[in-house]
Image (spheres, rainbow, N blue to C red):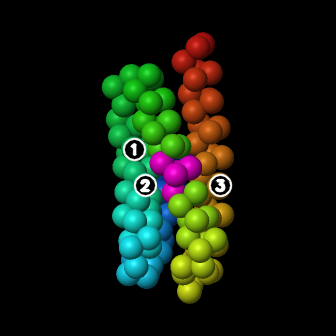
């Protein structure tokens, strides 16, 4: 695996861990538990799909996996913002860090998808 791909994978794993910590610190009420379950699903998916993209069967499959990762990152980002708006987390530093990181990862994946599409056309 190329160095930049390994760095991104490591970053995605760290993001998943940090978001999982947020999910596990949510209150036990029903609405928080719904957000928790959805956050847990969406926050680990980008790392897993990026791993799959690294061994994609074709350029089309690679782009598809990146797009799934991007969609899950956007979902996680919105979920984190809902959690923030509802003031459900006491450790707002970790929450703020995850919101910032989700924004940066979304930007990276938008660029990666666009580059992969452009490379496919050439």
Q: Is residue 91 above or below residue 18?
A: below
The residue nearer to you, when weighing 86 against 62, is 86
Q: Who's the residue at 39% across and 73% down the image?
A: 30
Residue 3: in sight, yes or no?
no
Q: What is the secondary structure assignment of the residue under circle 3?
A: helix
Query: Cα distance, mark 2 to mark 3?
Result: 16 Å
Badge number at residue 14 = none
**Which numbered circle lies on residue 104?**
3
Q: Are marks 1 and 3 in contact (CB under 8 Å)?
A: no
- Residue 91 vertical placement versus 4 (above, below): below
Which segment did they paint magenta?
Answer: 72-76
SS class of the residue under badge 1? Answer: helix
Task: Please say whether residue 103 is visible from this viewpoint.
Answer: yes
Which circle's residue, 1 or 3, is located before the other in the chain? 1
**Measured Cα–Cα span from mark 1 to mark 2:** 11 Å
Front label number (1 vs 2): 2
CB under 8 Å between discs 2 and 3: no
Q: Which residue is mark 1?
A: 49
Question: Residue 56 is drawn in which quadrant?
Answer: top left
Q: Give me the residue at 50% from left, 36% from top.
A: 67
Residue drawn at 58 percent across, 14 percent down? 121
Residue pointed to by mark 2: 42
Label located before the other in sequence (1 or 2): 2
């Amino acid at each position: 695996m190329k160095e930049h791909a390994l760095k991104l994978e490591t970053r995605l794993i760290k993001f998943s861990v940090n978001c999982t910590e947020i999910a596990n610190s949510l209150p036990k009420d029903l609405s928080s538990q719904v957000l928790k379950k959805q956050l847990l699903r969406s926050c680990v998916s980008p790392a897993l799909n990026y791993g799959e993209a690294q061994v994609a069967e074709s350029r089309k499959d690679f782009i598809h996996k990146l797009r799934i990762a991007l969609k899950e990152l956007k979902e996680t980002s919105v979920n984190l913002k809902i959690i923030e708006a509802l003031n459900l987390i006491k450790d707002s530093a970790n929450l703020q860090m995850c919101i910032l990181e989700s924004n940066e990862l979304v930007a990276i994946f938008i660029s990666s998808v666009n580059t992969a599409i452009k490379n496919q056309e050439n």
